[in-house]
Image (tube, helix red, strand yellow):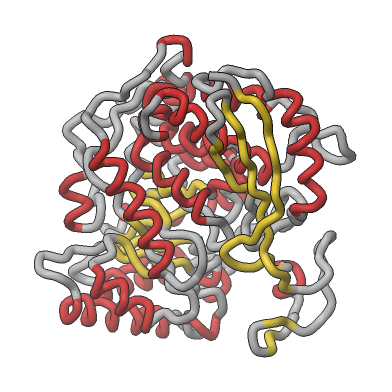
């Protein structure tokens, strides 16, 4: 079945664009907005309404499939592509992108996605299309292949990368925002497998000596016992945005830091704990070195707290660098920052055969369409966890991602219908020979079923 035409419609996203440079430089929040001038190119204000670009592909049978171009909340920061404006990129999608994809066989997802990746932007700056454009158009290509083959997007991805999809929902990670107590209690009542994120993005929230975070984890463990369903065994995951690096260094005192992490473990007990973004070292190389040092220190001290790579881990190459260096127990794969959605799948699969787990993340500033597409990536690659998105209200994103996985699993018969040999199954990135660890891929017995019920992978 052929792709007949491509349209693009400016739309909304699930949250806002924030000028991170201005906020870090001292822009003060007044109500929901920020005072002060923007500092990142493209911003008119420090906080602006999020935008998306809805992509519609019409197929030869008259059916229409969609994908949503979206970018992260802190667009234009940390080496990311510039602020995404739907009106600016609409002619790109309806022009050079449409010209390259019109008439192509919709069943060949991976070939079409690679064609998209190779398109020159035909505008100043960069050598590829904006990550948001590649992200949204690739979602539409994935849905087009599923429609043309009469199968699910999970089946399409499994065919493209020769994977055995998860047989139960991948554990969903809930994001509380600043309502870290109210939203955490909502998560506990609903039995969310991984929670609560917490948004600990200031010294004030963490505590001058880290005491506020420790007290919060003790409260969370207590509330989990009181509110969680029977046999509930969640995994706690908190994001500290590099703040611990400010509290405990420089200089870095290894014994002081490991003792503090052990106190966090004790506060969270009996639930396993992972801490995202413990420090921000200022560059990818420095971040990898500091994360690896911390991970080794925790292991040597017998402190069972996992660390999660976030800062300076944005692109596929970044993910590969962190995994190869053994610098994290978990890496976040920030789906919009990788461009085409197939790159997120490849990043998850790169973790296969290593002792690093893949967290398929993203941003609150996505859409329902992109969140649903990512749910299929999570299932097809059997990721360790997947973010509930879009938005910062928690309930809506949890519903969207969970329901999409349950619908897909209910439809699946265990085989991928319409799996053609011409879509070149198998990914060179997945080979264990690519990993410095030299470990073999995980065994088929590493089922997600136990984790979906209990909430996490304790490997």
Q: Residue at x 77, y 84 (%)?
A: 35
| Residue farthest along the left direction in this orientation | 230
Q: Residue at x 52, y 31 (%)?
A: 144
| Residue farthest along the front direction in this orientation | 62
Camera-nearest residue between 455 and 375: 375
Res. 274 image quadrant: bottom left
Question: Is 71 drawn above or below residue 143 in the view shown?
Answer: below
Q: Is residue 115 left or right of residue 185?
A: right
The x, y position of residue 327, in whole percent, is 46, 46
Question: Is 447 drawn above or below residue 113 in the view shown?
Answer: below
- Residue 360 in view of the camera: yes
| Residue farthest along the right direction in this orientation | 124
- Residue 321 in view of the camera: no
Q: Residue at x 24, y 75 (%)?
A: 189
Q: Is residue 137 left or right of residue 381?
A: right
The x, y position of residue 40, in whole percent, is 81, 63
| Residue farthest along the top direction in this orientation | 422
Q: How many marks?
A: 0
Res. 214 image quadrant: bottom left
The x, y position of residue 364, in whole percent, is 53, 62
Camera-nearest residue between 302 and 114: 114
The x, y position of residue 107, in whole percent, is 49, 21
Question: Is 28 drawn above or below residue 423 in the view shown?
Answer: below
Q: Residue at x 40, y 41 (%)?
A: 376
Question: Is 459 drawn above or below residue 30 in the view shown?
Answer: above
Camera-nearest residue between 449 and 241: 449
């Amino acid at each position: 079945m052929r792709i007949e035409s491509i349209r693009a419609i400016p739309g909304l996203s699930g949250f806002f664009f924030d000028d991170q440079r201005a906020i870090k430089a001292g822009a003060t929040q007044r109500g929901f907005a920020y005072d002060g001038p923007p500092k990142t190119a493209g911003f008119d204000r420090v906080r602006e309404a999020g935008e998306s670009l809805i992509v519609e592909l019409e197929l030869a049978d008259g059916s229409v499939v969609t994908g949503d171009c979206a970018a992260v909340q802190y667009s234009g920061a940390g080496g990311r592509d510039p602020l995404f404006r739907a009106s600016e990129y609409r002619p790109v999608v309806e022009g050079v992108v449409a010209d390259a994809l019109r008439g192509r066989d919709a069943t060949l997802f991976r070939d079409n996605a690679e064609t998209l990746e190779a398109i020159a932007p035909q505008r100043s700056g960069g050598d590829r299309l904006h990550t948001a454009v590649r992200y949204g158009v690739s979602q539409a290509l994935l849905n087009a292949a599923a429609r043309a083959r009469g199968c699910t997007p999970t089946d399409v991805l499994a065919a493209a990368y020769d994977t055995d999809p998860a047989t139960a929902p991948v554990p969903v990670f809930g994001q509380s925002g600043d309502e870290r107590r109210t939203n955490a209690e909502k998560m506990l009542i609903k039995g969310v497998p991984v929670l609560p994120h917490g948004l600990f993005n200031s010294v004030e929230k963490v505590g001058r000596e880290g005491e506020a975070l420790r007290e919060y984890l003790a409260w969370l463990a207590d509330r989990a016992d009181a509110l969680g369903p029977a046999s509930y065994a969640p995994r706690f995951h908190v994001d500290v945005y590099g703040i611990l690096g400010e509290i405990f260094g420089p200089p870095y005192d290894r014994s002081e830091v490991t003792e503090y992490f052990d106190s966090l473990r004790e506060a969270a007990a009996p639930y396993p704990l992972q801490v995202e973004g413990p420090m921000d070292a200022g560059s990818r190389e420095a971040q990898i070195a500091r994360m690896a040092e911390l991970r080794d220190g925790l292991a040597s001290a017998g402190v069972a707290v996992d660390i999660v790579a976030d800062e300076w881990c944005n692109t596929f190459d970044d993910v590969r660098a962190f995994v190869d260096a053994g610098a994290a127990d978990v890496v976040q794969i920030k789906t919009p920052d990788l461009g085409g959605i197939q790159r997120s799948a490849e990043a998850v699969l790169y973790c296969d055969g290593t002792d690093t787990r893949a967290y398929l993340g993203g941003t609150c500033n996505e859409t329902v369409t992109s969140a649903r597409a990512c749910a299929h990536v999570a299932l097809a690659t059997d990721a360790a966890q997947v973010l509930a998105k879009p938005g910062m209200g928690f309930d809506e994103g949890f519903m969207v991602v969970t329901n999409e996985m349950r619908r897909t699993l209910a439809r699946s018969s265990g085989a991928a219908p319409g799996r053609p040999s011409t879509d070149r199954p198998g990914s060179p990135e997945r080979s264990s020979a690519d990993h410095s660890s030299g470990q073999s891929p995980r065994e088929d017995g590493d089922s997600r079923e136990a984790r979906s019920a209990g909430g996490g992978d304790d490997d």
